[in-house]
Structures are given as C-alpha cells and as structure tokens.
Image (tube, helix red, strand yellow):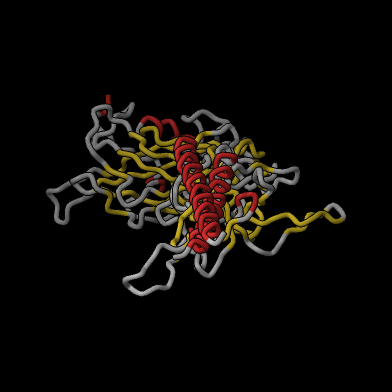
C-alpha cells in the first residue's frame, strides 16, 4: 500500500465512523420512542488484492445492523388498548392516505411495527402515536363470529339480549338427604300423590305436581340450584329448583337397584313454594352404589319448554358433564352446588375493554357479559432483522425477511402496556467515545500521510 492508498483508507475510516456516530445519535434521540429498535453499526474490511505474502489492510465499509429481535422493556400504561409484544413478532398496520367527503382512505400495503400505543380515534379505529392503524379481525359480540378482516374498530356498541339456552351445573347430592319429612318419618323418599309425577327411567314425560301436593313435595325434597335466566328480549326469569329422591339403592337384588333422583322447577313464582305447581325436568338421574351417575349419559339433558309464571324460555339444556353430578354422603343432608352458570343475558352497553395474552380484545358490557370484540393482527418473520425500516417505526417485508408467518408461537400480548425503546444510553455513550477516538485516529493517519507526501515532494527540491 502506498501513501495515496493510506489516504484513501483513512478517508473510508472517517466515513465509516461518521456513519456509526449518526446511528448512535439516532439511537440516543429515540431512547424514549415507543417500540423503537436501535440500529447498531457493523464494520467490514475490504482487503486490497495482493499476493498471499503481500496482503495489506484495505478500506472499511460500515453497515447497519438491526436489532429487531432484541426486546425492549415492557411498562404498564393507563390506556386499556395499549399493548406490547413480549417475544418476537410485529403488529400489522395500515397507513392513512387521506380523507375524502368525510371518509378516510388507507394504503393497501401492510406494514409491521412494534409500536403498540394504540388508542381509539374519533371513529373508534385503533391508531398508535405514529399514525398507524391496527388491523386484525373484528368479531360480532352477539355471535362470537368474525365479521371481517381489516381495520379494528372499537365502538360504543350495544350488546343485544340473548335468551338462555344452556345452564351449566355441577353438584353433589347427599346419599341420605335431610328433609322435613325424613326427620319424622325416617324416610328420605318423595312419595307423590300422583305416581305419574315422578320418573324412574332415565327419561320420559312426567306430569306436573298438583298444587295440592306441593307442600308434601317441598317437605320431601331438598333445595336445588336457583338461577336467573333470560328471554330473547332480556327479561329476567328466576328458575328455582328442588331435588327429590324417589328411589333408594338396593344391592341385595339382582340386578342391583340404583338410587333415583328427579329434578323439579317451580312453575309459578308468584305463589309460595308449598302452594306452587312444580314441573319435572323430564329425566331421572340414577346413581350406583359408589355414588356415580349412570343415567342419563352424555353429560346433559334438555328441559323441554321451561316455563315459569307464564314466561317460556323454550328448550333449555342442562349441562353437568360426565362427572358433574355425584351422590356421596354428606353430613348436612343437602345438595352442594359446585358450578352454576347460564349463557343468557339482558342487553348492555360497552363499559370497558381489555387485551388478552393471545391478542384478543374483550369488551365488558354493563350487563356483566365479557365477549370478544376483535383479534389483533400479528405477524412473525424467519429473519426479522431482514425487514426494511423506515420512519415512524415501520418495517417492510423484503426478500431477506421472508414471508410473514401467522400465530404468536410463544410470544404473548401484554395489555395496558407499551414496549420501550431497546436503546441503552450507557452503551450508546460508550460506543460514542470509541467512535470519537477512532475518528480522531483516522484524522491523524491523514495528517501523517500528508506529512509523508510533503517530505517526498521536498526530496526533489
């Protein structure tokens, strides 16, 4: 390498260090930018082509080194729709291109970002601080089905009323129930005035208990679950039930006789329990000597035309699962309810929203219902550092990054939080000192080479 080459090499060194200090200054400037990923600098030496015995150091090339895979700190915020990615991946967003006649227009190219400080705009669309609009799947809160894929919109919607169709219930029935009659008669069985009002087989049609036998029924049964159901218009209906044991088990017979219970609901809540007609749910529940339910199988029954005080809920499914009902000994002699829920509700307005770890935006309504409103758009890349960055924290897909992949794949979404910049100020200051020293050293090389050139020119004077 001659003196001129040394000058050229030092110039390339100055350019490389200038590029490095530019990246450092950008990183420090964006140390508080939400979701910002710092840009490091890598240096590549360009060797002069010489023989193996005459290799000399050549010029240097500075290149950007992205840090998209390095996580920033996740901090909590006060905005429910703020979200941060814990792990790899990006939010999918679109940029607004303009407004025409009061209608916003958006670009067609999907962009990717880690900036998750999303909040609703005046129309309910989620937009972050850089002006990016979040995309994903909108969900119909009434049906739970996805309605469209595109911009996510969280509006102050009203959730229509939903009729009760399913009651989920699990409980233990006492092997020896304590009733008002059992304390005097010693029998824990219900013996109806009309034998047709009980069922001994797994299913069938039982007559309604006459109001004249209601007092005997109440005194010979135990309290079951009480739940509020809803009609299609959202009107509440209180469903009060009682369990009556109609047959004891007998293991001395062949085959053994199982224990049989019948479930009844109060048909008229305007009258007292001992004067109201009670309706059989339409199935006999049989238990073996070990207290396990043997019939009906399948984990659920249908209560036909469930009608309370003239209000018909239609056919309501009672789900108890394969092991939800048992008959074990209980000192209290009463039924122990473990689970009791129903799927109906009255109408309600949106009260608040929350983002779940799997990227679903749930809405809580004034009627207490929590339903899904949208699913956040999310993408992963095989080589995330191969994405092309631009201003506002956007990234574009490139050949080096590969195609976007669906699914979180181990990553999670943290709601009511944002991801901070992954810039480390202390590290950037350290790199700044090293870069400044390297830049100064290259200027010394230039001045030294210039002195040598001057000495060479002075030889011929």
- Identified at 69% across, 45% down, the residue is 155
Q: Is residue 255 visible?
A: yes
Front residue of 260/185: it is 260
Look at the image and tell me in which quarter the N terminus lies. bottom left
- Identified at 70% across, 42% down, the residue is 156
**Residue 315 image offset from top left, x and y in percent:** 52, 53
Relative to 303, is 161 on the left or the right? right
**Residue 50 image offset from top left, x and y in percent:** 39, 73
Outermost residue to the left: 252
- Identified at 27% across, 27% down, the residue is 332
Outermost residue to the bottom: 51
Seen in the picture, residue 385 relative to 266 is either above or below; the reply is below
Look at the image and tell me in which quarter the C terminus lies. bottom right
Outermost residue to the right: 101
Seen in the picture, residue 253 relative to 234 is either above or below; the reply is below
Front residue of 141/130: it is 130
Seen in the picture, residue 55 relative to 179 is either above or below; the reply is below
**Residue 31 image offset from top left, x and y in percent:** 55, 38
Q: Is residue 191 visible?
A: no
Seen in the picture, residue 283 relative to 156 is either above or below; the reply is below
- Identified at 66% across, 64% down, the residue is 109
Front residue of 314/164: it is 164
**Residue 173 image offset from top left, x and y in percent:** 30, 38
**Image quadrant assignment for residue 334:** top left
């Amino acid at each position: 390498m001659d003196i001129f080459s040394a000058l050229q090499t030092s110039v390339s060194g100055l350019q490389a260090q200038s590029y490095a200090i530019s990246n450092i200054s950008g990183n420090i400037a964006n140390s508080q930018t939400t979701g910002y990923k710092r840009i490091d600098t890598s240096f590549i030496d360009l060797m002069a082509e010489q023989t193996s015995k005459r290799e000399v150091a050549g010029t240097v090339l500075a290149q950007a080194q992205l840090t998209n895979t390095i996580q920033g700190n996740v901090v909590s915020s006060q905005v429910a729709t703020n979200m941060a990615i814990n792990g790899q991946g990006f939010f999918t967003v679109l940029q607004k291109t303009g407004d025409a006649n009061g209608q916003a227009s958006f670009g067609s190219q999907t962009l990717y970002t880690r900036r998750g400080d999303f909040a609703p705009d005046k129309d309910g669309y989620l937009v972050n601080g850089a002006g990016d609009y979040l995309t994903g799947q909108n969900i119909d809160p009434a049906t739970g089905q996805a309605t469209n894929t595109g911009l996510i919109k969280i509006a102050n919607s009203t959730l229509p009323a939903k009729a009760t169709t399913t009651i989920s219930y699990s409980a233990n029935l006492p092997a020896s129930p304590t009733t008002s009659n059992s304390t005097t008669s010693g029998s824990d069985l219900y013996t109806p005035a009309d034998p047709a009002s009980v069922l001994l087989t797994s299913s069938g049609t039982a007559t309604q208990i006459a109001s004249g036998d209601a007092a005997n029924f109440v005194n010979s049964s135990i309290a079951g679950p009480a739940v509020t159901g809803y009609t299609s218009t959202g009107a509440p209906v209180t469903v009060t039930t009682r369990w009556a044991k109609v047959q004891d088990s007998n293991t001395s017979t062949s085959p053994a006789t199982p224990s049989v219970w019948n479930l009844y609901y109060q048909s008229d809540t305007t009258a007292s329990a001992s004067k109201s007609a009670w309706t059989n749910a339409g199935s006999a529940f049989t238990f073996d000597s070990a207290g396990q339910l043997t019939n009906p199988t399948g984990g659920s029954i249908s209560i036909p035309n469930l009608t309370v005080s003239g209000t018909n809920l239609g056919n309501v499914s009672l789900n108890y699962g394969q092991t939800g009902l048992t008959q074990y000994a209980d000192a209290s002699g009463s039924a122990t309810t473990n689970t009791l829920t129903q799927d109906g509700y009255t109408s309600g307005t949106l009260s608040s929203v929350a983002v779940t770890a799997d990227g679903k935006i749930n809405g809580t309504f004034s009627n207490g219902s929590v339903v899904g409103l949208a699913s956040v758009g999310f993408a992963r890349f095989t080589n995330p550092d191969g994405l092309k960055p631009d201003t506002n924290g956007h990234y574009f897909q490139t050949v080096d990054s590969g195609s976007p992949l669906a699914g979180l794949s181990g990553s999670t979404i943290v709601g009511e939080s944002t991801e901070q910049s992954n810039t480390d100020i202390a590290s950037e200051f350290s790199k700044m000192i090293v870069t400044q020293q390297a830049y100064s050293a290259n200027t010394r090389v230039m001045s030294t080479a210039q002195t040598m050139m001057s000495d060479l020119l002075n030889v011929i004077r």
